[in-house]
Image (tube, rainbow, N blue to C red):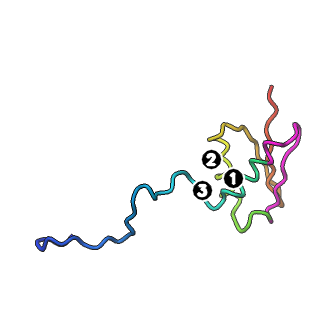
Amino acid sequence: MAKGNGKKAASHFDIIPIDEVPRGRKGKHHTFVFEIIDDLERLPAGSALRVPFSDFKGTRLANVRAALNRVTKARNIDVNTSTDTDALYIWRPKRP
């Protein structure tokens, strides 16, 4: 803001009404992670999902794991994961 002339400086960013602000998180992994969650919910006991790295659509393993972790924690879903050179494996641990 300039001193003394009473004029406000132009905003550096767009100004929008609060009603137009998106609520919630829908990152670039949203659809992919929710496909995994959907399959996980229908997974037979004693089975794991095998998600080939080629399905990651240019995304790094760490990013997918982080997004999956956020969703499973928010939904209180207990999961285990493992990897090899080709895929991410996801399963629900057996309950005692």
**Residue 40 falls in which quadrant of the image?**
top right
Q: Label 1 sits on what residue type? A: Arg
> Residue 42 bears which disc, if any?
none
Label whose residue precedes the other's in the sequence (3 or 1): 3
Give how far apart the Cα atoms at labels 1 and 2 are: 9 Å
Q: Residues within 10 Å of mark 1 (few under 14, many from 20)?
A: some
Q: Residue 44 placed where, x, y %?
A: 88, 40
Pick the residue in front: 87 or 15.
15
Does 5 lie within the magenta span? no
Q: Tell me the magenta residue range.
A: 39-54
Q: Secondary structure at mark 2?
A: helix
Q: Residue at x 60, y 56 (%)?
A: 26
Identified by mark 2, the residue type is Arg
Q: Which residue is disc 3 drawn over? A: 26
Name the one closer to the observer, 47 or 88: 47
Question: Where does label 2 land, which residue?
Answer: 70
